[in-house]
Amino acid sequence: MPLSSLPPETLTVTLEFLADEDLATLLLAQRVCKRFQAIIEQILLMQNKQHDAKPGGASRTMSIHPLIHRHFHSILKAEIPKHKKGLAIGPSEPSGRFRRLPWAIGDGDGVKRKHMRGNPHLRPEASWRRLSVGCPAIRSLDVVKVLTVYGGTSMSFEQLDLAPAGGFLTMGLFYDLMASGAGHKGHTTTEWQLLPGRRFKGYDDWLALRRRGTYPSRADVMRLFEEDLTSAVLFVAAHRGCTDGWRRGNGVEVEEDEKIWQPEAIGGVPVVLHRWQGCVNKPRKLWTAWVHEREG
């Protein structure tokens, strides 16, 4: 008996099981017919709603949507081992994390451009791109990058413009942030992690920490983030040594189709990082007055 002839309730249960086991196939199944597309879109929508609140409507602590965490964990949290010369190379470099996604054809350096060309999952309108990353939705994302060099540690902090995604963090916007390179520090990156339900406290806290030591520990940096139900922090750590930037090719010419597939932003909308402006919940007039007071 073909799936299309199953009663709606039975077909829905079958496709819900597929959502847990094989997201890539589930998303492709939307192309079978309008009936499949409608049921699958409803499944994705209901999974969002089921994890947005407790029974009775009370909000829970912020978390990453289980469906997102299950299938996109390789780009939500990454630890990148370094080459002996301080560089991240091969499958361990930032782009290698994308070659572990469910629709990657091949493994690691075996994911070639020719295999990924025309991949339906990499279309701007692909349905996975509309999924909310957080439960409840993430309304503010602080991007905090910590770079350690010989002589000390520096920090940069920005906020991602969520307007292109409707004011909340979608998987598509997060994918583009990381694939474009704006969300990490390139080959110097040693790790990144999306921390839901957190926000950056403020510049003064960082200065106080920096005065206590030249090389703050990871645990100390994590204390710069406080709880906030509508926010998240993208924490990025990087290390730049004396030999960073030293690269040597192997001199072998490789045809375009045989080159390793490299991810890129596919949403068609620029990824914009603004200068950090503080908590989005702070009234704008009060925040502006506070900034003017601090700047004298």
Image (spheres, grey):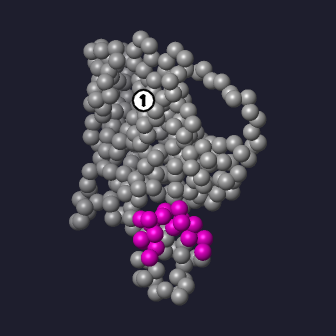
Q: Position of residue 281 (x, y in %)?
A: 33, 41
Is 245 situated above or below 184? above
Q: Which residues are magenta?
A: 14-32
Q: Position of residue 160 (x, y in %)?
A: 47, 39
In the displayed orientation, state which residue is furthest to the top: 151
Identify the residue at horizontal 53%, vertical 36% (top origin).
93
* CA neighbours of label 1 inside 10 A, class few (<14), some (14 to 19), many (20+): many
Is 151 situated above or below 19? above
Q: Depth check: give the residue in front, 183 or 166.
A: 183
Is 26 situated above or below 143? below
Left or right, 11 with reference to 262: left
Q: Is residue 37 visible?
A: yes
Under mark 1, the amino acid is Ala
Q: Is residue 271 visible?
A: no
Picture mark count = 1
Q: Position of residue 262 (x, y in %)?
A: 62, 42
Identify the residue at horizontal 46%, vertical 51% (top origin).
72
Which quadrant of the structure image shows residue 17?
bottom left
Left or right, 261 with reference to 217: right
Magenta run includes residue 28: yes
Q: Which image quarter holds the C terminus?
A: top left
Which quadrant of the structure image shows residue 253?
top right
Identify the residue at horizontal 68%, vertical 27% (top origin).
249
Identify the residue at horizontal 48%, vertical 29% (top origin).
82
Q: Position of residue 269 (x, y in %)?
A: 60, 46
Magenta run includes residue 39: no
Q: Which residue is mark 1?
A: 237
Determine the secondary structure under disc 1.
strand
Magenta region's main secondary structure?
A: helix
Q: Depth check: give the residue in front, 17 or 205.
A: 17
Is 49 situated above or below 275? below
